[in-house]
Image (spheres, rainbow, N blue to C red):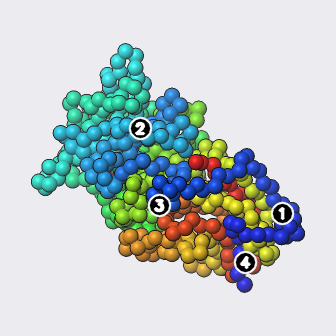
């Protein structure tokens, strides 16, 4: 028998059944959800595929998040942007600002290519002590550090066509002046030499830059953001190396529930992510201002798995963290590009291409001798709940499929949480579907895998690689219980397992919005508890 826990839009329930099943359910409602308004002028793109609460540029191409910093109540997000087409082209930095980490408003373009090259990925810092000397009339400079990509050099076959440049802003990131002595780091003869991420090291009181250099990360230091000294490199023999290393991020983080600090190094790699194409791996270690050294325990974890990933899905790439988050907040806030170089240019949106992930909070936990970097949606998302249905405990032996019907849940803006207990040697599938398409997330305790199956999720033919296989994560042992959070936003699913210890982020393009959800298994014993179905409110 297949036991289903079902959530189907528009399904009619009898009153008796409703009373019977709702003994433990609570519904809070702030305001009625708005119906999906069909406006004839809006293209299919806008109606069906423009996300409601994930950032997309109004028009044209976007890739990596860049230069994120917080200042005076505003979260700045810059991004790789080509304003003239919906495919990658000469890179600019686009710009968006949010006051709540969820609604981002697009701003005028921040950085344009110049005679030194295109403006590739990089970071930005708030230079409070005016170490750069760019400050003027008491105005604190914000300094952007980015890669120049020289197309002519690349065409000529030179090796040194990527260099690092800086620019500063005296109006909180709205307009920028490029430094007149760029580049600040010239190329030592390394073809892939890019994506500077700069932090202030409070111990050595210097700026530290992590830079991707082919198959390793190079660290540089500076007292003024203009003159940089090479310190060391890391990684040639660690982690995954089936592709080029890109977009690093090095930062200290407190281990949850302790006074211990560790350093995290994020490294994106393309191709050879765990499920193909682009993905972001991480390393845990210590940094003394010069060298990043892997933690012994983490080294053992790497010996076992070879690489450990921030996200096992196919659509979270080049993500890095915000700088200058106030101490009183103290969070490490991350955002990634929700796409994959395998098919980013082909996804079936036309007015714009690409979306960012939901901003996430990173936390480091230590269990026995194992470190795990958790990533979860920022808590600000809870401010956008329009109604919430909660249930304490559901028994899979009952006719669960009727329980949540007639709530008319909008699957285009869903934040769903639940826990499963008493799992056995079986498969458990969490299924979103409509008449023709389905998206299946699952736990297979026989093969010890977690999976995300978008192979029949709607439009998939636009690229051979998009739905070529089911994404999988190997589990060290079968799961007896599990905590799941799923965010849906029209064309994206972000699955957070066990508080973000395992995460899967993927895109899908259903022909019609999903209108049904159920949990199914051949096992009749397992229990579903702590169910929270939150519909989010966005226009
Ligand atoms: C990562 C990346 C970066 C580069 C940028 C160019 O997606 O390849 O390494 O700076 O994109 O747009």
- Asked if 173 appears above or below 12 in the picture, the reply is above
Q: Quadrant of residue 397?
A: bottom right
The residue drawn where x is 37% and y is 25% is 170
Q: Which mark is residue 3?
A: 4
Could you tell which of marks 3 and 2 lies nearer the N-terminus? 3
- Image marks 1 and 3: residues in contact by CB distance under 8 Å: no
**What residue sits right under mark 1 in the picture?**
22
Quarter holding the N terminus is bottom right
Local packing at callout 1 (Cα closer than 10 Å; few below 14, some 14-19, many 20+) is some
Q: Which mark is residue 218?
A: none
Given this view, does label 1 or label 4 mark the residue nearer the observer?
1
Measured as percent of width and height from the top left, residue 134 is found at 32, 23
**SS of the residue at dot 4?**
strand
**What residue sits right under mark 3 in the picture?**
44
Determine the residue located farthest toward the top in the rendered image: 137
Q: Is residue 277 visible?
A: yes
Could you tell which of marks 1 and 3 lies nearer the N-terminus? 1
Could you tell which of marks 1 and 4 lies nearer the N-terminus? 4
Given this view, does label 2 or label 4 mark the residue nearer the observer?
2
The residue drawn where x is 74% and y is 73% is 401
**What residue sits right under mark 2 in the picture?**
107
Given this view, does label 4 or label 3 mark the residue nearer the observer?
3
């Amino acid at each position: 028998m297949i036991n289903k826990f079902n959530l189907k839009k528009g399904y009619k329930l009898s009153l008796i059944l409703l009373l019977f099943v709702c003994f433990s359910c609570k519904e809070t409602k702030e305001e009625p959800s708005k119906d999906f308004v069909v406006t004839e002028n809006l293209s299919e793109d806008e109606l069906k595929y423009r996300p409601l609460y994930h950032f997309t540029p109004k028009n044209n191409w976007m890739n990596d998040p860049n230069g994120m910093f917080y200042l005076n109540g505003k979260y700045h997000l810059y991004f790789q942007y080509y304003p003239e087409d919906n495919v990658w082209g000469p890179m600019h930095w686009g710009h968006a600002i949010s006051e709540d980490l969820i609604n981002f408003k697009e701003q005028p373009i921040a950085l344009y290519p110049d005679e030194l090259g295109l403006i590739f990925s990089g970071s930005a810092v708030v230079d409070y002590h005016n170490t750069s000397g760019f400050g003027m009339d008491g105005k604190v400079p914000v300094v952007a550090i980015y890669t120049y990509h020289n197309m002519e050099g690349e065409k000529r076959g030179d090796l040194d066509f990527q260099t690092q440049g800086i620019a500063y802003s005296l109006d909180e990131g709205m307009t920028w002046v490029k430094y007149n002595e760029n580049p600040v780091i010239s190329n030592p003869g390394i073809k892939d030499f890019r994506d500077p991420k700069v932090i202030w090291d409070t111990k050595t009181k210097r700026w530290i830059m992590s830079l991707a250099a082919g198959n390793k990360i190079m660290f540089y230091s500076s007292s003024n953001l203009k003159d940089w000294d090479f310190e060391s490199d890391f990684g040639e023999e660690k982690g995954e190396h089936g592709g080029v290393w890109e977009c690093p991020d090095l930062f200290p983080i407190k281990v949850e529930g302790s006074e211990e600090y560790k350093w995290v190094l994020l490294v994106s790699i393309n191709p050879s992510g765990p499920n193909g194409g682009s993905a972001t791996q991480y390393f845990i270690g210590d940094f003394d201002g010069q060298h990043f050294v892997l933690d012994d325990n983490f080294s053992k974890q790497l010996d076992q798995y070879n690489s450990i990933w921030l996200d096992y899905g196919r659509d979270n790439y080049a993500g890095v963290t915000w700088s200058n988050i106030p101490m009183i907040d103290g969070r490490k806030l991350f955002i990634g590009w929700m796409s994959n170089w395998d098919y980013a240019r082909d996804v079936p949106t036309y007015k714009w291409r690409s979306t960012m992930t939901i901003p996430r909070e990173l936390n480091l936990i230590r269990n026995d001798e194992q470190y795990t970097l958790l990533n979860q949606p920022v808590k600000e998302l809870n401010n956008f709940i329009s109604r919430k249905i909660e249930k304490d405990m559901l028994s899979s032996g009952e006719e669960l499929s009727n329980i949540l019907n007639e709530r008319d849940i909008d699957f285009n803006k869903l934040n769903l949480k639940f826990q499963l207990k008493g799992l056995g040697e079986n498969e458990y599938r969490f299924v979103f579907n409509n008449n023709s398409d389905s998206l299946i997330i699952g736990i297979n305790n026989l093969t010890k895998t977690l999976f995300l199956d978008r192979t029949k999720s709607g439009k998939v033919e636009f690229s051979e690689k998009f739905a070529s296989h089911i994404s999988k994560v190997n589990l060290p042992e079968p799961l007896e219980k599990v905590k799941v959070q799923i965010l849906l936003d029209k064309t994206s699913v972000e699955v957070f397992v066990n508080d973000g210890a395992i995460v899967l982020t993927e895109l899908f393009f259903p022909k019609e919005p999903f209108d049904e959800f159920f949990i199914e298994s051949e096992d009749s014993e397992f229990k579903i508890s702590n169910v929270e179905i939150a519909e989010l409110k966005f226009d």
